[in-house]
Amino acid sequence: MATLTLNYDGRNKSARAIVEMLRSLDFFKVSEQKAKADDPTLMSKDEFFKMIDERMESYENGNYVEFSSPEEMHKYFAAI
């Protein structure tokens, strides 16, 4: 027996429909696993809005970079 792992966005209607279709075929055993809590890409709703508030405050305090052209922007990011 082989194991197949699918990682998908549970909020995506198309992805959920595909998973439900696979479940309906009855020759797949489905076990759901939640994302690991230590995944650094995950954050709570409160953390998300706190991050946005911090970025807005930083912007309002003048902490941002302005570009006069796309070339200038590319040059800036290439140097980082």
Image: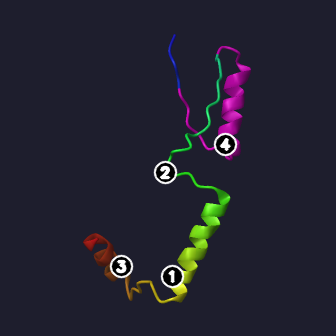
- Between the C-alphas of marks 4 and 3, the distance is 35 Å
* Above-or-below relation of 21 to 69: above
Query: Of helix, strand and loop, which one carries label 4?
Result: loop
Q: Report the side of 22 relative to 77 (left or right).
A: right
Closer to us: mark 3 or mark 1?
Answer: 1
Q: Residues within 10 Å of mark 2 (few under 14, many from 20)?
A: few
Residues at marks 1 and 4, CA–CA distance in whole angstroms: 33 Å
Residue lying furthest left in this view?
79
The magenta segment: 5-27
Check residue 73 in the rendering and tell me which mark sits there, or answer none. Answer: 3
Residue under label 2, please give it. Answer: 40
How far apart, in angstroms, are the residues tagged by discs 2 and 4? 18 Å
Residue of label 4: 10
Q: First in sequence: mark 3 or mark 1? A: 1
Question: Residue sitting at 45 percent across and 85 percent down?
Answer: 63
As helix, strand or loop, the secondary structure at mark 1 comes to helix
At label 1, the amino acid type is Ser
Please tell me the numbered disc located at residue 58: 1
Q: CA distance from mark 1 to mark 2?
A: 22 Å
Q: Position of residue 39 (x, y in %)?
A: 51, 46
The answer to which of marks 2 and 3 sits earlier in the sequence is: 2
The reply to whether callout 4 and callout 3 are in contact (CB within 8 Å) is: no
Q: Is residue 15 magenta?
A: yes
Q: Kindly state the secondary structure of the residue where label 3 is placed.
A: helix
Give residue 28's position: percent from left, percent from top: 64, 17
Give the mark nearest the N terminus, 1 or 2: 2
Q: Is residue 15 above or below residue 70?
A: above
